[in-house]
Image (tube, rainbow, N blue to C red):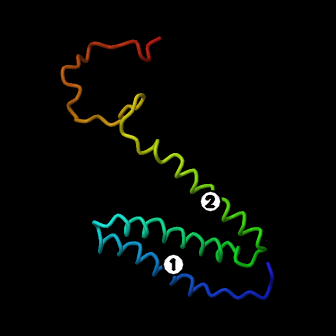
Amino acid sequence: MSEGHQTNYAKIYWTLMILFIISVAGPEMFPESKAVILITAFGIAVVKAIIVAGWFMHLAHEKKYIWYGFITSLALLFLFVIAVAPDVTMTKGHNWQSQIPSTMDSHEGHDETNHDDHGHH
């Protein structure tokens, strides 16, 4: 890192605070709008992450190849999320089983004295 760089951390702090307020106020003002919720949740989070990486991790003053690696990593993370999203959000399918019981009393009629062999050796 070169010695001539002066960072105004107060300006960065207030920028992050304003982005935080927007990310909280957006969904509060427009709770029915999924676009506003997604933009404020993920869009502003990405902007804040870039600000933090750029200034607090001093990447803004590094050589360009550092940023290429950073952007490539973000792109691969985004690609991974897009690739697994259909499987994660699936609620029905051939091998899909719900891990959450539909009702709390779904074990009615279960005999407590009737034990299976799970855990017994």
Residue 117 lies, in percent from the top left, at 40, 12
Q: Residue at x 44, y 17 (%)?
A: 119
Could you tell me how many numbered marks the image carries? Answer: 2
Position of residue 73 in the picture relative to residue 109 (left or right)? right
The residue most toward the right is: 2
N-terminal label among 1 and 2: 1
Picture layout, residue 120 above or below residue 90: above
Q: Disc 2 designates what residue? A: 75
Please identify, in this view, whether the residue under mark 1 or under mark 2 is nearer the observer. 2
Position of residue 66 in the picture relative to residue 86 (left or right)? right
Quadrant of the rendered structure where residue 98 is? top left
Residue 32 lies, in percent from the top left, at 28, 66
Q: Residue at x 43, y 66 (%)?
A: 41
Residue 89 lies, in percent from the top left, at 41, 45
Query: How packed is label 2: few (under 14 Cα within 10 Å), some, or many (20 or more)?
Result: few
Mark 1: amino acid: Leu
Q: Residue at x 23, y 26 (%)?
A: 107
Query: How packed is label 1: few (under 14 Cα within 10 Å), some, or many (20 or more)?
Result: some
Q: Residue at x 36, y 39 (%)?
A: 91
C-alpha gap between disc 1 and disc 2 = 23 Å
Position of residue 94 in the picture relative to residue 50 (left or right)? left
Name the one closer to the observer, 103 or 98.
98
Name the one closer to the observer, 47 or 9.
47
Mark 2: amino acid: Ala
Residue 72 lies, in percent from the top left, at 68, 61
Q: Disc 1 designates what residue? A: 16
Picture layout, residue 78 above or below residue 111: below
Picture layout, residue 33 above or below residue 2: above
Name the one closer to the observer, 39 or 61.
39
Picture layout, residue 58 above or below residue 70: below
